[in-house]
């Protein structure tokens, strides 16, 4: 979807743009939280989140406000200024989500966003996922935890070998 790999077949269209033909457009309008941990050793969560926001064009004032809002909403403030190498897997996962959500694209892709996240912060995370969708982003969520996801999603699609086999509400 973000143009890193060319599909073998089919098409991907976002807001009327063929992103296979124009992968640069895809990278401008998509935010992504990869399944693997983001490499934030040597920086703090606050720095990592702010860096992404600045790269996506936000002003310094907006960066501080939005970063703080996400850190507070996910209750990770006690680790906000801790070096990334010292964070638990769950906190790193939440920071990765914040990096995707701080300046959400038209499409926000989240790959297993709740992996390693404790139950309390999972609820906060799902509320933030819902807020992204309510704010106008199309959220593409990859998860094996359908029970959790069904509380937060509007439409469901099941893929098998890269093809949609069923979709609906």
Image (spheres, rainbow, N blue to C red):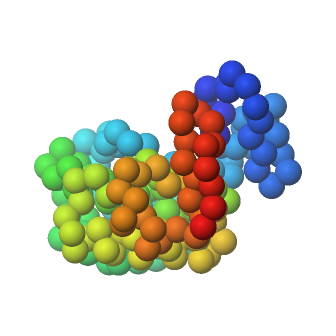
In the picture shown, does residue 58 fall above or below 39? below
Quadrant where the N terminus is found in the figure? top right
Residue reaching furthest top? 8
In the picture shown, does residue 153 fall above or below 29? below
Quarter residue 105 falls in: bottom right
Quadrant where the C terminus is found in the figure? bottom right
Residue 85, given in percent of the width and then of the height, sits at 18, 44
What residue do we see at 24% from left, 60% from top? Answer: 117
Residue 83, given in percent of the width and then of the height, sits at 20, 51
Residue 119, given in percent of the width and then of the height, sits at 21, 69
Quarter residue 154 falls in: bottom right
Tell me, yes or no, if residue 37 can be seen here: yes
Q: Nearer the viewer, residue 118 or 157?
A: 157
What residue do we see at 38% from left, 42% from top? Answer: 35
What residue do we see at 61% from left, 26% from top? Answer: 5
Quarter residue 114 falls in: bottom left
What residue do we see at 41% from left, 51% from top? Answer: 143
Residue 148, given in percent of the width and then of the height, sits at 36, 66
């Amino acid at each position: 979807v973000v143009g890193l790999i060319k599909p073998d077949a089919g098409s991907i269209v976002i807001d009327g743009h063929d992103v296979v033909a124009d992968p640069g457009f895809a990278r401008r309008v998509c935010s992504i939280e990869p399944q693997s941990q983001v490499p934030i050793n040597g920086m703090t969560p606050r720095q990592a989140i702010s860096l992404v926001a600045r790269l996506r064009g936000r002003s310094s004032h907006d960066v501080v406000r939005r970063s703080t809002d996400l850190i507070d909403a996910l209750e990770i403030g006690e680790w906000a200024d801790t070096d990334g190498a010292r964070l638990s897997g769950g906190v790193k996962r939440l920071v990765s989500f914040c990096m995707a959500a701080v300046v959400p694209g038209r499409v926000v892709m989240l790959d297993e966003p709740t992996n390693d996240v404790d139950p309390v912060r999972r609820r906060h995370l799902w509320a933030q996922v819902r807020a992204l969708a309510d704010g106008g982003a199309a959220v593409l969520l990859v998860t094996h935890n359908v029970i959790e996801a069904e509380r937060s999603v509007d439409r469901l699609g099941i893929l098998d070998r890269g093809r949609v086999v069923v979709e609906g509400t």
